[in-house]
Image (spheres, rainbow, N blue to C red):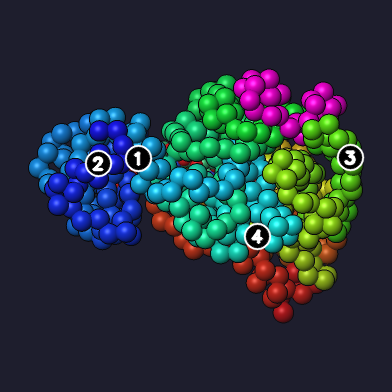
Amino acid sequence: MTNWRDIEQQLKKAQVVLEPSARLIPDSRQVTKGDIFIATKGFDQDGASYINKALELGAVAILVSDACDEHLYSKFNNVVLVTDLEKKIAHIAKEFYIKDQSVSMPVIAVTGTNGKTSISHLLAQLSQICLQQESAVIGTIGTGSINDLQPSSNTTPGVTEIYRLISEFLVKNYGSLTMEVSSHALEQGRIEGLDLDVAIFTNLTLDHLDYHGTMEAYFEAKAKLFNEYQPKCAVINVDDKYGRRLADMVANQTRVIAYGQSDNVKAYSDYVYIRGFECHTHGLSIDIEWQVIGAKEECFLQLPIYGEFNCLNLAAVFATALTLNWPIVAGHFSQLKPVPGRLELFVKPNLPVAVVDYAHTPDALEQSLLAVRKHLSGELYVIFGCGGERDVSKRPIMGQLAQKHADHVIITNDNPRTENEDKIITDIEAGMTGSNYQIIKSRKEAIELALQNATASDAILIAGKGHETYQVIGTESIAYNERDYVEKLMATLTNHGGMI
Ligand SMILES: CC(=O)N[C@H]1[C@@H](OP(=O)(O)OP(=O)(O)OC[C@H]2O[C@@H](n3ccc(=O)[nH]c3=O)[C@H](O)[C@@H]2O)O[C@H](CO)[C@@H](O)[C@@H]1O[C@H](C)C(=O)N[C@@H](C)C(=O)N[C@H](CCC(=O)O)C(=O)O
Ligand SMILES: Nc1ncnc2c1ncn2[C@@H]1O[C@H](COP(=O)(O)OP(=O)(O)OP(=O)(O)O)[C@@H](O)[C@H]1O
Ligand SMILES: N[C@H](CCC[C@H](N)C(=O)O)C(=O)O
């Protein structure tokens, strides 16, 4: 049995009635009445051990993989056994959800260690501005319209959820979909079967070695987006050495648009080149030259967005809009807004500027510290931590970079999860010298202290949580919205942090 039609026939024979609202659900905890539960063999667990739970919650049928333990599924009715279900599920989900496969929308996939959310949200904003049409996103902050994001638990959801979301976006008539594609997703085939109009590569720096083992394996996972999926167009940051390797290995039928600010860029026939840029208190000015299909042009963009790295993100957005034939003009870019929790500024007269950012990798932390320095004068405070149950090799490097680029460092908690929080902090300290830093495990206290100690001309970078709305301690997720907290705290403070 290889396709949905065969499965449907078998379910009909078994007199299973499927409602139009039925969904394919691989996680028993998400099953609701009328759904079909997908039981596969996972990394840690056998999905078939949750069949009972799924039936209790109202599943009307079960698709089970032959990789699952037979004892776990043989006793149930309405079970359809599918050989190699793990490999076939993408195809089955596509047929199940996309009934009319002639209807489609441009799909843009963004991969890389940092910048995926920023680029996808900026593209969705630009679509609204220049096409007056809503676009969908799938990524870390959520899914759907950026004006009404629905929560997502992974950066890239599982393949059944992806096709369910796409069917919903087609009904809503969104102009395009930009999805963040993590290296885990590429390794696990979560976007299998998708036809990609554009694939964007941002950069590759240290992260996720707990999962991939080596940078080379991490790169190979990212490269799948370009060599296995063969997008129509590849928009690649060729300032990055891994980007240059990718640009050399894409298939002939994929058009490469190189972007960046180094001399490498103009070696490609299609490119978006950042000739220069300026960082000022109101944002960025970027001088761009581009050549796409022969014609060479230039323009000057002004944006109320911070960060040198956002020049690169903007170049990727620009190149993508060009290849999709969006009618962009320079003025559209000045209407873009910062992405929530990405170098997001909180400003109040007579108080230091607070910048909430999602930097949680060494490169992102360094880039965001350098970025804040370039836009703002005064002393720079940084408050950051490292996640528990995540790549430990980044901890001392982040400690070292914080000390190198900031004037004042406060180490705090960032989702210690089930790890010992003191051990995480000791790992960070291993990269630091001297004792001119503070440890304040409570993020709230750390932020309040920095706001009280800093002067009105200083800046405080609060890194690691960005848009997150929780702090995970042990297995408990405690509500904590850093953006709200900072805004409310600043409202209660007068100059130099004195409480009202
Ligand atoms: C290690 C890993 O990547 N696991 C992913 C994998 O899970 P799996 O199928 O191996 O799951 P499993 O735990 O062995 O369970 C087997 C089956 O039992 C089911 N189950 C399990 C428990 C239960 O109560 N009921 C139930 O039905 C599971 O849904 C699964 O179908 O496939 C699932 C569906 O695609 C993913 O949701 C899941 O991501 C887990 C939750 C995860 O945390 N992954 C992280 C590492 C991740 O993917 N991160 C990247 C981005 C990181 C970044 O760039 O910052 C991401 O894309 O989010
Ligand atoms: N092009 C870039 N290069 C380096 N750092 C960047 C870049 N863009 C954003 N950053 C930094 O990385 C952080 C995360 O950015 P963003 O959320 O856009 O990346 P992401 O790839 O979606 O990350 P994640 O997969 O972890 O969600 C930002 O808060 C910022 O500090
Ligand atoms: N999606 C990333 C984000 C981590 C953000 C940081 N706040 C942390 O918890 O480490 C991850 O799960 O590794």
Residue tagged 3: 297
Q: CA distance from mark 4 to mark 2?
A: 37 Å
Residue tagged 4: 133
Residue tagged 1: 92
Between discs 1 and 2, the one toward the N terminus: 2
Q: Which element is circle 4 on?
A: loop
The amino acid pointed to by label 3 is Glu
- Badge 1 local density, few (<14 within 10 Å), some, or many (20+)? many
For image coordinates 22% across by 31% down, the residue present is 66
For image coordinates 74% across by 32% down, the residue present is 257
Between discs 3 and 2, the one toward the N terminus: 2
Residue 340 locus on image (x, y percent): 65, 58
Q: Is mark 1 within 8 Å of ligand 1?
A: no
* Residue 66 in view here: yes
Residue 253 colored in magenta in the image: yes
- Badge 3 local density, few (<14 within 10 Å), some, or many (20+)? few
Residue 7: mark: 2
Give the position of the N terminus as an image quadrant.
Answer: top left
Residue 497 locus on image (x, y percent): 75, 69
Between discs 1 and 4, the one toward the N terminus: 1
Q: Which element is circle 2 on?
A: helix
